[in-house]
Image (cartoon, coloured by chain):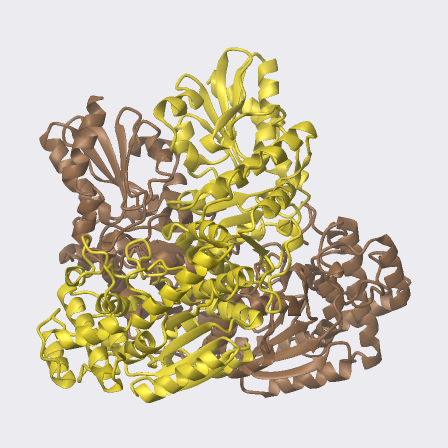
Chain colours: A brown, B yellow
Amino acid sequence: MTIEPARLPLMANAIRALSMDAVEAANSGHPGMPMGMADVATALFTGHLKFDPSAPHWADRDRFVLSAGHGSMLIYSLLYLTGYAAPTIDDIRNFRQLSSPCAGHPENFLLDGVECTTGPLGQGLAMAVGMAMAERHLNAEFGDDLVDHRTWVIAGDGCLMEGINHEAIGLAGHLGLGRLNVLWDDNRITIDGATDLSTSEDIKARYVATGWHVTECDGHDFADIERALQEAKADPRPSLVACRTLIGKGAPNKQGTSATHGSPLGASEVAAARETLGWAAAPFEIPSDILADWHMAGEPGRRAHGTWAGHLEGSPRKAEFERRMAGDLPEGFSLNAHIAGLIEAPQKIATRKASEIALAAINKALPDTIGGSADLTGSNNTLAGGIGTFSKDDYAGRYVYYGIREFGMAAAMNGMALHGGVIPYGGTFLVFTDYARGAIRLSALQHCRVVYVMTHDSIGLGEDGPTHQPIEHLASLRAMPNLLVMRPCDAVETAECWEIALTQKDRPTVLALTRQNLPQLRLEASAENLSAKGAYRIKAAEGPRKAVILATGSEVSLAAECATQLEAAGIGTDVVSMVCSELFDEQDAAYRADILPADALIVSIEAASTFGWQRYTGCDGLNIGIDSFGASAPASDLFAHFGLTAEAIVPQIQNKLNA
Amino acid sequence: MTIEPARLPLMANAIRALSMDAVEAANSGHPGMPMGMADVATALFTGHLKFDPSAPHWADRDRFVLSAGHGSMLIYSLLYLTGYAAPTIDDIRNFRQLSSPCAGHPENFLLDGVECTTGPLGQGLAMAVGMAMAERHLNAEFGDDLVDHRTWVIAGDGCLMEGINHEAIGLAGHLGLGRLNVLWDDNRITIDGATDLSTSEDIKARYVATGWHVTECDGHDFADIERALQEAKADPRPSLVACRTLIGKGAPNKQGTSATHGSPLGASEVAAARETLGWAAAPFEIPSDILADWHMAGEPGRRAHGTWAGHLEGSPRKAEFERRMAGDLPEGFSLNAHIAGLIEAPQKIATRKASEIALAAINKALPDTIGGSADLTGSNNTLAGGIGTFSKDDYAGRYVYYGIREFGMAAAMNGMALHGGVIPYGGTFLVFTDYARGAIRLSALQHCRVVYVMTHDSIGLGEDGPTHQPIEHLASLRAMPNLLVMRPCDAVETAECWEIALTQKDRPTVLALTRQNLPQLRLEASAENLSAKGAYRIKAAEGPRKAVILATGSEVSLAAECATQLEAAGIGTDVVSMVCSELFDEQDAAYRADILPADALIVSIEAASTFGWQRYTGCDGLNIGIDSFGASAPASDLFAHFGLTAEAIVPQIQNKLNA
């Protein structure tokens, strides 16, 4: 049983009706895009997208990304119409209300079938690149029988105009991701008006220049859409299909204008649209014959799922495939042996180097990792463990040369994490988290296990100067919800941090690592991962405790030096390595009070902005840091210049205690 | 007297020698790019660039931007060789040392002739777009006699691969900035290796698709370079000149490889390079005949400067031109009349709307402003005062439709501010400061007067949900040095904030503005700008003061509501509007202690991350905010959901006081 072509326009109108009605009810939202792309989306979901509404997590489903996330009613309509368990029609009635999973923009954590959170423009397409990478990698690993799907994207002009688009399509073109198909809603309208108000670009030529296949179609002619989709699938390159559409199609007086973009159509225009579309059903009602047609759309996918399940059952790699897709680490995975080796033979190395040797162990024990760097491989020390290069000639490779594309890298890593089956990590300098910040936020919001290997984490990088020296970055990342920011002080803590990061199935981690060598402070074996508490006493006061110094990363050894001098002066001093304040904040009150005793002076030392440290030191404590931009000089000169030496700090602590 | 063409290769070798020697002495730096682009730079500086080494601030000079800022020794060499007062040869000897203005990357605040700080890749070119915009605008305003110069850029592969490149060249192509000429160091090498490791793009085709003129040349053939530069200048479109070069040219064993990119060549390779180049002079010594040739390079510029000075003297617009270029506001500029009008007829409006009506007054009184928005004009309320559209058909216009290019917009604004003569402001949603953050940081580092009009500043934006609701953004921006973050609570404070922002000649401002309406709290005339102190008591305790509530923006009226309920319960409560914490921190200790009395409970209320507020409240205070991501719902539902109501807050304050 297949859907009659003549039914497609009616099915598309169901999307239009739900979209305009939901936006009208919410008195908020974006009807123009769902109405404009209803025909293309109908063609995709009825004829091409491989999906099983009863099994939204099926590993070999096609991924569908609504990069133009403001058009969220498009995907809510599609999920409802094709028979997903959610959203219900009541969820759609409650579009954009607190009780509904149909949020203003699609959120992957609210609805199955929403593969990623979109809304921040350009990132959906860039995440789709990561999904397509993960698909090819797992295909290389597990074969066509288990992994053989496409990634489909609907994107708008905004997605294509954002800078990240250049990075994303450059990566996709270079990697030859032929199973990535982007349907561009070429409606020539943005919020401010016609696209020619702000752009004169030949988008199709740009995509061709970037290694893509490009075709176009009339986005309201089903035969033409079908031809274009077939063409896109047949080409070995990633494809852009320029779908010429009328924004808000069906709203007779407003279609084709920016008036339909981000506001309800209004009661009279909705009535006029019903007239135009010949849509007689009441709001939120879908005629049963049309709903029945829509329910057939998932049939081919259901059948394919059944076949696939048979393949999985018969596969000798079933357990491993399931482990990978579940995101579990291999049984018994641990870095204990690696850490024991460090205890035995302490290393005075940079934590970026410590990360590299930890990664050598990780990448050998954990086939899930896909590493990379935004053109700083030798600086980020991200290539380790003998993993090969991921390229269009070898998708089995596990190291990605991302190029100078920090934002694109981060978004691709989100896409990989969301796809599942792989654990992505990638490096750049900590200061350039600024370039990738939009995607780091989406890692956190979407609960993605992504590990950011951010090296050159302070003025300790030296001569490259203020543009390369992070100051406010640690604070600004710590302020972000659901993100772990870890700054290990030596090789042992670095390994512990990697272990923690890999076990966080539902949140990303930033590892802030030094360029410069650090002494190994952790010299004794520990049964537990001490960093997992977020902060711990790495050196206890010898004399009666009067001060507690909190420090992170490269400043822990400085704090220890200060403590030694203070002890010599009779001032008992704890040194706490605050390796991850988010984890520390999750400890119980007793533990926190033990680390931060009320009867001691609390001092923070970090070669970064002091902003935020007062939550531990209070207003009465002492915050040693750098609240200006850095400078260009050898690292040791800079530490002296900015007062980050025991000579400069110890008297301040003494004065404060004497005050 | 002109420079003989045969001398050019020798002159270029002077750049090579200084670059490799300085990097060698510093044992740090990037010799490959200056050595590779020495010939092109020599051709540019001797034959095309209009500059006067004795007057680096001459308004009508060509702007030269070394977008590939890691090759800083190129510009230091050029400034020294052409006879700028700085750097001296000792400054170059001390390359990358604390005492030298020759920092690792070029810093505009350290050396005249360095038009902007570069190093964060892609932003130099993007700032150059802004410089070229400012040039055309001032040309439209003051005519060819006073404003008639070009903007030249040297960019590397990194600058072209970054996402911001797409935004920047899209804007430049659309605006037809024909006086922008980019010389691309096409050396096919990045840090990780050959460019084909990470990109397969046809860069030239992409530029053509984006509305640029493109030509190419052999970057080591002076005749070919000359032909290409002439061609670039003749074309009415912005130009990309692909200069095919050998990275590290002159270093016989390392040239053409990434080994020359970011490390000293080493003594033996430097010796071999001296041999290859036939360069017999000692390190840091330039043969006098070559130095004499170089000193001639500025001659045409000196003469042009003289002619131009005559034009200025004879111009009826001399005073206005000088005022504009000095960055001074017009005499008597003030918003007092506007504010008096608000006091007379209070407005219950969103602060974005308050910003619009302030801008209407500003844009009429201040011809310097160039406004715009990244495709959110109607949401950011940035178009006001009857300013026309800046377009290639009318560069006199003062409103830029930046398109969906937040990062490109911010960088262009930096370029405009650095060019001088204009005061740029531009809008997007506060959450999308994440997209522009790299450029906001450069606004702050470079001391640029740029005003960021960031609307939709909290969950108060409502239904668009967590991707659009800033949480950590205020904290993360406050952590950045040299940036003012202002969050006004009503229409009066909004006008005060605009007044402050416009008078900050050496730092940028972020205005965080609401989507939702707010009551006007400031109802009495004030002789001074109360917001200028950063925080002030907007409502003093009636009973004996037990609590002080600090709040910003939309939460000030909530704080006032809490205070009213607390007063009714006998708890004297101050309400402080903390409109700009950076300005508050600059007040004297007495003022700060008066606002934050030691004997009261200090409470902060802000619909955002509480991170950082403890610097005012201490660990013993109370921090009301949102430390998770937002949600999609009507604003009032969200405020209730997140506990930002007087009903939820007042009992917490009472409990804390009773504890």
Residue A432 or B16: which is nearer the viewer? B16
Left or right: A29 in relation to A537? right
Q: Is residue A397 visible?
A: yes
Query: Is residue A360 visible to us here?
Result: no
| Residue occupying the point 47% across, 33% down | B532
**Outermost residue to the front:** B314
Residue B308 lies in quadrant: bottom left
Q: Nearer the viewer, residue B202 or A171?
A: B202
**Which quadrant of the figure has residue B418?**
bottom left
* B35 relative position to A421: left or right: left
* Res. B518 image quadrant: top right
Query: Compared to A253, does B562 lie above or below?
Result: above
A268 and B351: which is toward the camera: B351
Of B83 and B554, nearer the camera is B83
Q: Residue at x 54, y 87 (%)?
A: A236
Image: B570 above or below A573: above
- Please provide percent x and percent y for residue B365: 59, 45
Q: Residue at x 52, y 70 (%)?
A: B172
In the image, residue B442 lies at what x, y percent? 40, 55
